[in-house]
Image (cartoon, rainbow, N blue to C red):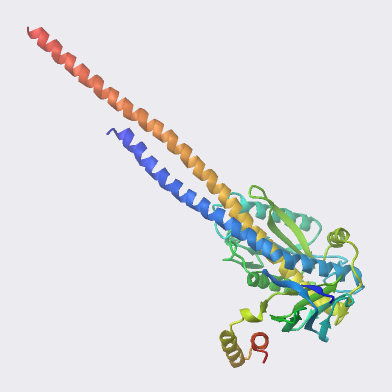
Amino acid sequence: MAELHVELVAADRKVWSGEATIVLARTKSGDIGIQPNHTPVLGAMDPQPVTIRQADGTTVVAAVHGGLLSFADNRLSILAEVAELADEIDVDRAERALASAKADSEAVAQRRAEVRLLAATGR
Amino acid sequence: MGAQLRVYKRRIRSVTATKKITKAMEMISASRIMKAQRAVAASTPYATELTRAVTAVATRSNAKHPLTQEPVDATRAAVLVVTADRGLAGGYSSNAIKAALELTKRLKTEGKTVDTYVIGRKGVSYYGFRNLTVTGSWVGFSDKPTYQDAKEASAALIDAFVTDTAEGGVDELHIVSTEFVSMLTQNPVEARLLPLSLAETEANAEEQGPFPLYDFEPSAEGVLDALLPRYVESRIYNALLQSAASEHAARRRAMKSATDNAGELIKTLTRLANTARQADITQEISEIVGGASALADATAGSD
């Protein structure tokens, strides 16, 4: 089965890299699924969890807070200022952050906490 | 103990204490260089990918974006200088400042007004002492910058860049920082962040071969809009990390030579103290011998 190479990179570290069969992400103009041999694409992303399916059926979910994806030559790079894998996320902390962001009506912080929770719990 | 000897002993003690401090600082800096270098390495994948993407959009698309357009007659420029928060790092801060002042002078001869932005306490106090105007400054993170710090600084710079020149905005964005070449060499470097200098991006493009024909989501302009602030942030972040590594390397070198000099001084002072002690002893002996022979003469005379 054809695979594409994925590099998930945050500003200060490489979060994840490996082979995948399909990657789902949300760009500014809508959801996009990238499979091997996709046409080269360069897109600005909305804050939303990114799902990476691997050949053995396992999925990697990461909270990606905005950023950019670029795909060419079967190589997908996802660049974000902040990106975390689902199992790195502290759910309690994200819930607390969500509550305080809602109370202070801070849209960015709220969205960030929501994306974290979405990635970590699938809710 | 003679007075001379006591003075030498005291100085040796004080120099030894100083040497201990400089030695400790040297070792701390040496360990932090490693950490700073690792941080530079960790941020490199992001920076390279981002630069590649920016170059791809800028060269491949026909999008006209203010951030990539060469202004016809630039009248105002912003210069960001990266210096240290603390001293005792040899010429690290002053070299960066010197490079920034040269750049400012050059921009002025080109007829541009220059807004100066400063990072690091040393730079702030330099400009403050000389009554030079500083438009913005950030301090407190020069030895361990985070992405958030870079974001703060670049937000102000991008703000100034997108503001109309008539309302106090700038047409160009320059950054002066210190490049970490090796443990022994750190060079002050200047770079123009915005507008994107095409010569630089084209040189990169040639190295990496031709770019594929990208589809842009949502559009080339939309991608550029999202991309360029990130690009500036990442360039500033990289400059901050490089400068932090350079600062530690410069401090290590300065402290190493201070330690060496203290060792040299202790050696000289010990020699002098030994001479003084020996002189004291010689004098005492000659006094005793003189006294004894005087006594012997006196006894011989009475016989």
The residue located at (50%, 40%) in the rendering is: B261
Spot occupied by residue A95 in the image (x, y as percentages of width and height): 59, 89
Q: Residue at x 48, y 49 (%)?
A: B23
| Quarter where residue A105 is shown | bottom right
Residue A43 on image: x %, y %: 82, 78
Q: In this view, does B247 lie to the left or right of B302?
A: right
Please say if A77 is above or below B144. Answer: below
Q: Quadrant of residue B280?
A: top left
Quick check: B286 above or below B219?
above
In front here: B149 or A55? A55
Judged left or right of residue B24, residue B34 is right
How many numbered markers are drawn?
0
Which residue is drawn at the image coordinates 78% and 78% (left, top)?
Answer: A55
List x then y, in percent, for residue B33: 60, 56
Vertical arrangement, residue B32 with respect to residue A92, above or below = above
Give the camera-side residue of B165 and A9.
A9
